[in-house]
Image (cartoon, grey):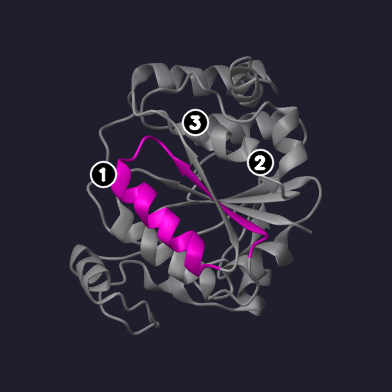
Amino acid sequence: MKLSLIITTYNWPEALSLVIKSVRNQTIKPYEIIIADDGSNSKTKDLILELKRSTEVDIVHAWQEDIGYRAARSRNNGISKAKGDYIVMIDGDMILHKNFIEDHIFHSEPGYFVQGSRVLLSKEKSQRVLSKKKMNFSFFSRGLMNRKNQIHSKLLSKIFSKVNNNHYGTKTCNLAFYKNDCIKVNGFNNDFTDWGREDSEFVVRLMNSGIMRKRIRFSAIQFHLWHNEYAKVSKKNIEKLEYAVKSGIKYCENGLDMIAKNES
């Protein structure tokens, strides 16, 4: 199975550098790395050019113009360039456990998408990690906000992972799905142009089309660097999500296919 790792980013090259470093330390490497860039400046471009020369895995820079928050379209931009059969999405501030890719491959299963967990790092811990560029975490490390999520165990993962069809807790910082399933629902909805709920709306359409949600614990672990939180979710985004839930729609009109049309 060819696995494409898509990393979303926007003007934080210091964090992105550490994320790529954690990808290079994986027990199983992804087939390719795609940087879904929502309009970062030249510092991120220069970093990616440097990483391309030093990373054994192919890196693709999927950049789009910075005309506001367009995370949904940015993800579609990355997906449209993916050559893999299976896609794992993370954010550009998520440092990966060395078994992250291996775990996602293990949990992949036709008819399912996978939602993973994260360990939150405190502001002080994040600043130390960024300054010293050291990413060795243990259960007893200081600055882990929810340290139980740091436990890596196949046995505990088997016991506590479960299948449930709801969108609550959906986060594209640790989300995996088959590319064909994504194409069938036309990817993310480009009409989401403010922060929030574009990921939930996407997985609702997956579930409406018969793809079930697998929530995994104690596996596919990542460590989230601290940053200021975004503003509250806009009313129009909440309404788009509620419409997808109530109507049972499977396909969005302004989605993945619009990327190909705009590039042709």
Q: Which residues are magenta?
A: 30-55
Give the foreground label among 3 and 1: 3
Question: In percent of the image, x 71 and y 63: which residue is there?
Answer: 105
Residue 141 occupies which quadrant of the picture? bottom left
Image position of 178 (left or right of 243): right
**Residue 77 percent across, percent down from the top left:** 55, 34
Write down the quadrant of residue 202 in the picture: top right
Query: What is the distance, in whole Å, between disc 3 and disc 1 at their CAs?
Result: 18 Å
Q: Amino acid at mark 1?
A: Glu
Q: Quadrant of the N terminus?
A: bottom right
Q: Alpha-carbon distance for marks 2 and 3?
A: 22 Å
Label 2: how many Cα within 10 Å (few below 14, some 14–19, many 20+): some
For mark 3, what is the residue? Answer: 72
The vertical placement of 232 against 135, above or below, is above
Neighbours of disc 1 within 10 Å: few (<14), some (14-19), many (20+) = few
Nearer the N terminus, badge 3 or badge 1? Answer: 3
Indicate which disc, 1 or 2, sits on the residue closer to the N terminus.
2
Q: Which mark is residue 165?
A: 2
Tag count: 3
Relative to 207, does residue 27 appear above or below in the rendering? below
- Residue named by callout 1: 229
Q: Is residue 96 visible?
A: no
Quadrant of the image containing the C terminus: top right
